[in-house]
Every structure is written in structure tokens, then in C-alpha cells.
Image (cartoon, rainbow, N blue to C red):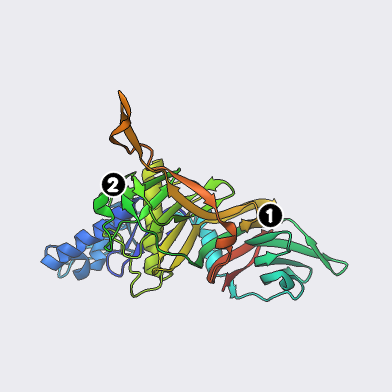
Amino acid sequence: MMIIVNDTLYKFTKEKGLFFSHVKDSTYLFDYFKQEEEKERKGNFNTTFKSNPCQMKSMNGGVTRVNSQVSRYIRPANDWCPEEGVSRSRPTPSPLPSFPETSEEEKLQEIINELKECSGSRPVFQNLFGKRFVCRDHFASDRRIKTEFWDQSWHFYKSVGIQTKTQKRTLRVWWASKSDEIHLGINTILLKYNFPQPQINSYSHPQLFPANSFQNPIYLWDGKFKVNVINNSFGTFVDAQLNLPHGRLPFFDFKNKQILNIYIPRLFRIDRYNLNLTTQDITSQSNLKALYKMGIDFLKDELGTLPKNIEFAVVYQKDYDNIEVLYFAERYSRNNNNKAKRTFYTDVGFKIGWVWNDKPSPIFAPDDPNTIIGTDYSGTSRFNIESADDYFRDYTHYELDFYGMARRGDTWRGNRMIR
């Protein structure tokens, strides 16, 4: 079993202890277990722990380094562990190392894991203008937290998003009321659209985009097309010069803040990730982990470190006429406030549109402007964005998994909405 807490990935094993590393170093953790499995398969491994767990606890109890990026924790022995057949006097036990106290982030994760699930009720008046689903939890009879999803059109204004807010009831009316902390977190948001499969060629990397065959994913970042040219656990992302002669790629743009977009072709080649979109849904746990790692690996490679707020979109060309879109984000937190909100679409906000490439330009002879002597491919790795809001607002299917929670004093309340 594996869990992620804050920036640390933990892997629990039955016989070898608890292994952990930073999320940014997760490939080292996975590679370590692959190496250990290979040793066991060849019969070249140490069986001390299996044969004498008490001795292992005495020798390696506490936190130890497996390598420079991976650590292991084994619960220390609470008593002396004598070797088999050897009688010895009982030594004075040495003080046990204390286990690190639970961090604030771990405490928050425990609260998130205990949130009540709901699908949301539909307020009658507000649903006259579209969809709105609401979950409620109460601090007291006159104080509550609401977690909402809305997709509404008021004729002059359109909006889609999620929010959580705390309120106090006075004179039978619920008014905004601040909380000590308020959090809005996104587990999964899946949207499906009708979108024709584009034809993709590459001037710079034609071997990665063969016609009617397996093609590499495309990373759209900072106005450029990028591809991973090395299929190993580290990867190298380089600019790619694409040609999209009969189509364009979908692109998701938050309020003029271009987030990372990853486009995965219908026939895709991803050797280094455990991605199975043929027999499993895109929202299966293994696929979500693989897609999340794709985004994390790219951002770490481009930025040198992970940003404070991780945010990116993955588009999968499900078939010739449909795409599935996953939006990944983390928790949005505010102190001494009554609301946390994330708007996915407004008339001027969340833009879901097209991108297309700059085309290569001919190079003319210096002494004859009518004679072409070559082609200039510089700049073809960049793309342009064209808004197509109305087209993309009409999704054919959506799935939501997000949560809202707040603290007043020592009391936490909230809900996890799944639709």
C-alpha cells in the first residue's frame, strides 16, 4: 500500500518495514523495489529479516537510509532478542529513538480521510438556471459549512466551478461567517467532450509520431510543444516542432494563467509509466497515479523543483471523436475567511480552446527572392491559443471528487462530494 502525505510518498510492506521518499524522488523508491524483486527472483537476497524479525528490529530499528533518496523505518524492538540456542544475561536496554510527531499536514490528511461523503442535494430555485449540488455539515444548529458544485447560465452570465463556505444563521437567514481555517481540495475532476482526433506530424521528431501507429504524449508548456525523448526513469523533455495540418489540439487555460497540458494520443507510447487506458478507466487508481507522476516529473524537470500549488490538465484521445480530460490540483487554503472557491469557466475566465503551431517559413536565396533554398523551422515548437469557450463548455459527461472543510476553534466540519 502507498499513500502520499504532503510532499512524502510512503510504501508499507509486511515484512521489510515502512519505506518513504519525497514525491519528487518517487522514481528512486520504485527503482529500489524493482531491484529488490530482481534479487529475490535470482535468490540473491538477505533472509535475516524473514528468519529472525526480532534480531532485525534490534539491529536496524528506527529510521535508516536505504540510499541517498530512500529511507526505511522499522519499529524498534521493545525487548532483548537473544540468538537461537544462545543463553545470555539480559542487557540494560538503551533508550528507544522517538518517532517523529505527526506533522500538521498529516493531521489535516487524517481529517480529510474521515470526511463524510455525499452526492449533493439540488436547491430548487438555483437549479432553474442549470445544475447546482450542495452538501452541508453543521458546527451547531446556527453554524454550518456548505460545499457546492455549480454549472449555471443566467442568460447574461455563465459559470462553472466549486466552492466551500461557512455561514451563520441569524433571523432565519444564512449569512457569511469567517472560520479560522477553510480548505477546498480536488481529488479528481473528469470531463468528456466530443472532439475529433487531430493529425499530428513532427518536423523535429518524426520517429515519435508515425502515422496510424503509437505516438508519444505531447506536453504543452510555456507556449511550446515538448516531448520526452528518453524512455527511462529520468526522462529528457525537449522542444518539438509539430505540424497539425488537419486539426488542432485542445488546451486548457485558467484566467490567462497557462497551466501544463498533457495530450495523450489514442495510440500512445509510454514505456516508463504504468498506464493502462485499454482495459481500465482513466480514473482507476493505477492510472491516476501514473498520470499524476507524468505531470510531476515534467514540472520538476522544467522548474528544478515542484511549485507550491501543483496544477495541470491531462487530455486523452479516447477514440476518433471523443476526449477525456482530467484536471489535477491540490488543496486551496485560506485563514480567517468564510470562503474558498475555484471557478472553471466564466465568460471571461476559464478558457478551453484550441492551440495550433506556427508553420515553417521558406528561406529565399540572398540574391534571388523568388528562389527557395531551404526551410526555416525555428519557432515551430511554439503554439498559439484561440478561445473556443462555447464549444468546450458543452461537455457530454462529468465526474467530480472534491472536498471542503473548515475549522472553528478545535472543531472541524466538512464534506467530500462525489458525483
How many discs mark residues in the rendered view? 2
Q: Is residue 414 above or below residue 204?
A: below
Asked if the residue at tag 2 contacts the one at tag 1, i.e. Cβ–Cβ closer than 8 Å, the answer is no
Residue at the image point whose x is 53% and y is 71% from the top: 396
Q: Is residue 341 above or below residue 171?
A: above
Instruction: Determine crowd level at label 2: few under 14, some 14-19, many 20+ residues with C-alpha closer than 10 A.
Output: few
* Front residue (pair 259, 113): 259
| Secondary structure of residue under mark 2 | loop
Which numbered marker is on residue 284? none
Q: Is residue 97 visible?
A: no
In the rendered image, which quarter contains the C terminus? bottom right
Position of 131 with respect to 195 (left or right) is: right
| Secondary structure of residue under mark 1 | strand
Which numbered marker is on residue 180? 1
Residue at the image point whose x is 36% and y is 51% from the top: 297
Residue at the image point whose x is 31% and y is 49% from the top: 202
Q: Amino acid at mark 1?
A: Asp
Q: Which residue does the numbered mark 2 point to in the structure image?
A: 68
Q: Is residue 298 visible?
A: yes
